[in-house]
Image (tube, rainbow, N blue to C red):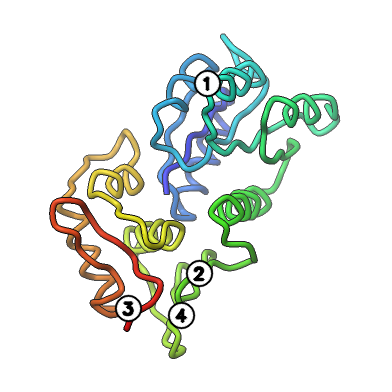
Amino acid sequence: MRLLLIEDDEDLVRILKKDLEKAGFSVDVAGDGIEGEYLGNEGIYELAILDLGLPKRNGIDVLTNWRAKQNTLPVLILTARDAWYEKVDGFKAGADDYLGKPFHIEELLARVNALLHRIHQQPGGSLQVGGLTLDESRQQVTTETGEIHELTGIEYKLLRFFLLHPGQVLSKSTLTAQVYDFDSDKDSNVIEVYVNHLRRKLGKQRIETHRGQGYVFKERVE
């Protein structure tokens, strides 16, 4: 799951990037509004975390420009705690949620996960699809028979993306983009290896190969 973090506070960026990656996200960072707006138009992110007080172009302008181009990228804005008017302006510009500074990383992660669930029509505290329950804090999956499987980092990223996009054909390049950030060495062959790992844990029929197109996660297995 790939996120875009647009924040110019380098100390905060280091902390957030580390915690978000630990939680199973791939994170790209933009330190100003112009770069952030450009990256947000690339169509590779599931969600953007957007600070409003940015150099070169403020967050409200970035968000306004995205929405003017029909860019529906989900956005969680960061605001100064006492700046209520920034929250109002953010919602008017098209934000999906906000979080006041300072904040606890646990709340940020909870809001990010809740927003992703809601956008993908998977409401509730845990991700449940096709009899599988994904524990996003422990990075474990429970099958319909009650078996609990620990997941490696890449297995977790892949399975969460599959569960948020059930029944959709997902190409290797799409999955690769969600597993790696810009700073990582990308290897599309890794996707095939870890898809097979998931099949061994969940059953071969769960993830179907569409030759020349990609993979499909099946909600129902006959």
Q: Please name the amino acid that badge 4 sits on.
A: Thr
Q: Amino acid at mark 2?
A: Arg
Labels 3 and 2: the sequence-earlier one: 2
Mark 3 lies on residue: 202
| Mark 1 vs 4: CB contact within 8 A | no
The structure residue drawn at horizontal position 54% and vertical position 65%, both measured from the top left corner, is 137
Amino acid, disc 3: Leu
Q: Position of residue 100 (x, y in %)?
A: 75, 37
Name the amino acid, label 1: Lys
Instruction: Tell me what residue is drawn at x 77 percent, y 29 percent.
Output: 80
- In primary-sequence order, the first of circles 1 and 3 is 1
Question: Circle 4 is placed at which residue position?
Answer: 142
Q: Are marks 4 and 2 in contact (CB under 8 Å)?
A: no
Gap in angstroms between the C-alphas marked 1 and 3? 40 Å
* Circle number at residue 69: 1
- For the residues carrying marks 4 and 2, which lies nearer the camera in this image? 4
In the image: residue 204, left or right of residue 52: left
Label 1 and label 2: CA atoms lie apart by: 38 Å
Residue at the image point whose x is 42% and y is 34% from the top: 28
Q: How many marks?
A: 4
- In the rendered image, the vertical position of residue 199 relative to residue 64, given as above or below: below
Viewer-nearest of discs 1 and 2: 1
Q: In terms of sequence position, does the residue under pointer 3 or pointer 4 come before the other?
A: 4
Tell me the element at label 3: helix
Image spot of residue 222 (x, y percent)? 32, 84
Say which label, 1 or 4, has the lower sequence index: 1
Residue count near mark 1 (Cα–Cα under 10 Å), binned few <14, some 14–19, many ≥20: few
- Residue 43 horizontal/vertical position (percent): 40, 33
> Taking 44 as reference, is 127 left or right?
right
- Decide if residue 92 is on the left or right side of residue 15: right
